[in-house]
Image (cartoon, rainbow, N blue to C red):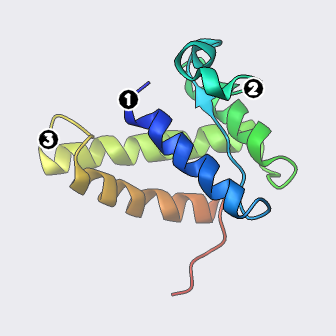
Amino acid sequence: MRFNMPFELGLACALKLTSPTDYDIFVLDGRAFRTDRTLSDYKGRDPLIHNGTSDGMIACLLDMFTPAVTQTPASFRGALKELRTSALQLKTDMRVTSMFRPAMFRLLLGLASPIAEKRGFIPPRAR
């Protein structure tokens, strides 16, 4: 867990206190019980554990957004495969070794949005 994540979670919790019905907070972690050790003030709430896998993350997403999400896990896996392929091509085109660059994030977001729209994960943007 990065050091700024507890701070960001605190900000989210404060925002939820100001508008309780406008926000939901979901905490995801790659390992079970780690949140109990690293965020002792957050005890009593169950984080969603993804075990550091894409299938675990898909299960967490389905848990968070059910019943609003009607897509199947296979649909999410297909979108992930499509995005992963696009990301690798983008990385090659930009001749960079890391995806963790501001420009890569912006470009990847631009690739992810149409994939999510096409699969019905998010509503189409007004053009």
Query: Distance from label 2 to label 1 (Cα)?
Result: 20 Å
Q: Mark 3 or 1 closer to N-term? A: 1
For the residue marked with disc 1, what is the amino acid? Phe
Query: Distance from label 3 to label 2 (Cα)?
Result: 38 Å
For the residue pair 76 and 122, the one nearer the viewer reads as 122
Position in image of residue 80 (x %, y %) = 53, 41
Give the farthest residue toward the left: 95
SS category of the residue bearing label 2: loop
Position in image of residue 45 (x %, y %) = 75, 28
Residue 4 falls in image quadrant = top left
Residue 83 as seen in the image, left or right of residue 126: left
Q: Identify residue for label 1.
A: 3
Tell me whether circle 3 and circle 2 mark residues in contact (CB < 8 Å): no
**Rendered residue at 15%/50% (across/down):** 94
Q: Identify residue for label 3.
A: 96
Q: Identify residue for label 2.
A: 46
Query: Distance from label 3 to label 1 (Cα)?
Result: 26 Å
For the residue marked with disc 3, what is the amino acid? Val
**Rendered residue at 49%/34% (across/down):** 6
Q: Mark 3 or 2 closer to N-term? A: 2
